[in-house]
């Protein structure tokens, strides 16, 4: 049994402690917005926030999140998240969309920590998120636009 908070709701799951958090979120809880990409924590599609930090859920074991506060793309909220999501849609950032939940989770964490990011800040924060459609220029533009709107 592992207990944690998921998107603001207390959860206790009867799963093996060695189960990847990604599979607990998707298969046990049924939240499928967090995607499986590479399974090696290198693509970022499975990014969730654990206690506010963007984390790859495919390589995070359920047993390691006991007592943690976990937020998925379905539960992300607040002014920063809402601004990022609005700008993402307005600038048509997604192409196929598969990586976008992880991209949004990382972008939201970046703007929460660094309200006025430079291109270098963006490159660093987003470097673990791969986009096979190569929408990187739109991702960067969206992060800058969201930062601008949040500043106002």
Image (tube, rainbow, N blue to C red):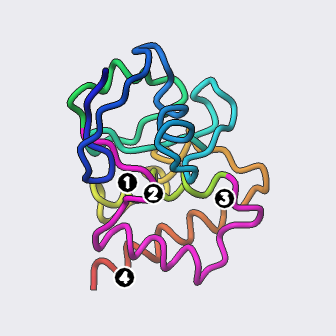
- Contact (Cβ within 8 Å) of mark 1 with mark 2: yes
| Earlier residue among tags 4 and 3 | 3
Front residue of 83/63: it is 63
Q: Which residue is mark 1?
A: 110
* x and y, in percent, of residue 135 in the image: 71, 61
**Res. 127 mark:** none
| Earlier residue among tags 4 and 2 | 2
**Res. 149 mark:** 4
Q: Is residue 128 left or right of residue 70?
A: right
The magenta region covers 69-98
Q: Which residue is mark 3?
A: 136
**Where 71 falls versus 142 (above or below)?**
above
**Where 124 falls versus 12 (above or below)?**
below
Q: CA distance from mark 3 to mark 2?
A: 12 Å
Q: Which residue is mark 2?
A: 107
Q: Residue at x 52, y 34 (%)?
A: 22
């Amino acid at each position: 049994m592992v207990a944690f908070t998921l998107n603001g709701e207390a959860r206790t799951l009867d799963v093996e402690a060695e189960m990847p958090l990604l599979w607990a979120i998707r298969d046990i809880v049924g939240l499928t917005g967090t995607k499986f990409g590479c399974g090696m924590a290198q693509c970022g599609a499975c990014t969730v926030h654990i206690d506010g930090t963007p984390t790859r859920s495919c390589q995070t074991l359920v047993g390691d999140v006991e007592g943690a506060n976990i937020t998925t793309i379905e539960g992300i909220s607040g002014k920063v998240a809402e601004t990022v999501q609005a700008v993402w849609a307005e600038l048509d950032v997604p192409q196929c969309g598969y990586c976008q939940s992880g991209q949004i989770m990382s972008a939201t964490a970046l703007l929460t920590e660094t309200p006025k990011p430079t291109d270098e800040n963006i490159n660093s924060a987003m470097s673990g998120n791969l986009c096979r459609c190569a929408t990187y220029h739109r991702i960067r533009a969206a992060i800058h636009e969201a930062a601008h709107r949040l500043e106002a």
